[in-house]
Image: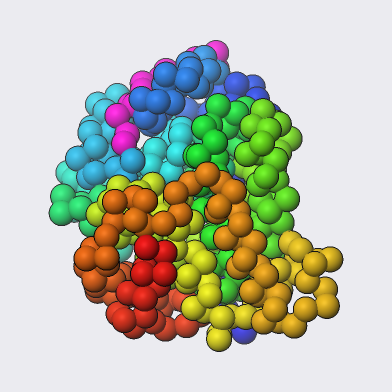
Amino acid sequence: MSGIEFYTNRHIVSEVDSMRQKLGVLAKQYSATSAIIITDAGISQLGYVDIAQQSLQEAGVQVVVFDGVVADPPIEIVNNAIDLARTNQCDLIIGLGGGSSIDTAKIVALYPNDFQSITDILDIDLSSFKKLPLFAIPTTAGTGAEATFVSVITAKDGSKKAIYTPKILPDVAILDATLTLKLPRHITAATALDAMVHCIEAYTSRTKKNPISDALAIKGLQMLWNNFEKVLQQGDDINARADMLLASTLAGIAFVNGSVAAVHGLSYPLSINFHIPHGHANALVMCPVFSFNLPEAASMYAELARAVMPTQTSTMTDLEAANQFILQLKNFLEMSGLKYRLSELDITEKDIPALADIVISTYARLIATNPKDMTLEEVTTMYKEIL
């Protein structure tokens, strides 16, 4: 086994109502005097920003709010958030919301350094950069952004740009399941399937698989697997919601240290070109990719199958267990209520060659971590399987 470097948050709080009860207390532990809450308009309308503000203000922390984040945040939006933080000399950065809000907050936390736009810091070494204290408070159980040191933003040409450095790992993750109770069923499903993909790809990574990530991936997947139907059918079950939220964080820690792979490679063009939400896009392509990987990954999928379906798979061969694992993931997708054919999402056969070309030309790094190499023709075939 090669050497391991492993990163995770300094402090994780997993507790119902913890944003209300502990955000201000934790802010003072970091000597905060002025905080910026980075979120989107929908989260503001739900009243969650008001709860966060009150907790901070009761602790004597001044607060400004940037609620202009949108999905797949464009560079311009992130620059606007940086400008607001700089103007108010904020010394605590809080990302409240889904992955886009938290990813935006990660970059804003670098604002004390000498740059005018995010474009100035893409593709450079950020190891010497200063970072302000950074809190992440997820409102979905899926992206794992609260536990990762990658921020994905959208360039002017529509391509996704990643800033990937332990420098932007959130210091504190607050996992408050009450913030997920109002999630619509389709978002609950898509984000849960996203987190499952994170666990599976971390566990089967060709380049960064390691025992620490493996343990977290297995535990996270078990919690997601056991609660998936429950949160779809009983969205107000706070215990199931709390398990899903913690599992998403475990998945995030696993994949940022173990890597994601070709599922993400095939999903990104769907999000960029057709605006399919990231979790839904991952769910669409996961089964074709996992089936394609079987010649190299059957034993690992079998290990995961035995962890989540021990009785059902105990007497199966590795290949049988792996196929049963993929079949159940397909059942989860069908159960979710999400559209699971590309044609249902206005994608036609003539769109597929361009999508496959993007995968091979732009996301080769994600093919490199996949258990099995794939060609342009093989990517094309996988897209056609779900047309």
| Rendering quarter of residue 81 | top left
Q: Nearer the viewer, residue 377 or 59?
A: 377
- Seen at 49% across and 64% down, the residue is 286
State the quadrant of the N terminus: bottom right
Horizontal arrangement in the rendering, residue 13 relative to residue 155 (left or right)? right
Q: Nearer the viewer, residue 140 or 378?
A: 378
- Seen at 64% across and 32% down, the residue is 235
Residue 160 place in picture, x, y as percent: 28, 56
Residue 80 in magenta?
no
Label tally: 0
Residue 305 place in picture, x, y as percent: 71, 68
| Rendering quarter of residue 79 | top left
Horizontal arrangement in the rendering, residue 359 relative to residue 350 (left or right)? right
User: Looking at the picture, does residue 303 appear above or below residue 244?
Assistant: below
Q: How is the image coloured?
A: rainbow
- Seen at 67% across and 28% down, the residue is 236
The magenta stretch is 57-70
Horizontal arrangement in the rendering, residue 310 relative to residue 121 (left or right)? right
Q: Nearer the viewer, residue 278 or 74?
A: 278
Residue 216 appears anywhere in the view: no
Residue 344 appears anywhere in the view: yes
State the quadrant of the C terminus: bottom left
Q: Nearer the viewer, residue 220 or 77?
A: 220
Horizontal arrangement in the rendering, residue 139 relative to residue 151 (left or right)? right
Residue 245 place in picture, x, y as percent: 62, 42
Residue 63 in magenta?
yes
User: Looking at the picture, does residue 203 appear above or below residue 47?
Assistant: below
- Seen at 27% across and 40% down, the residue is 78
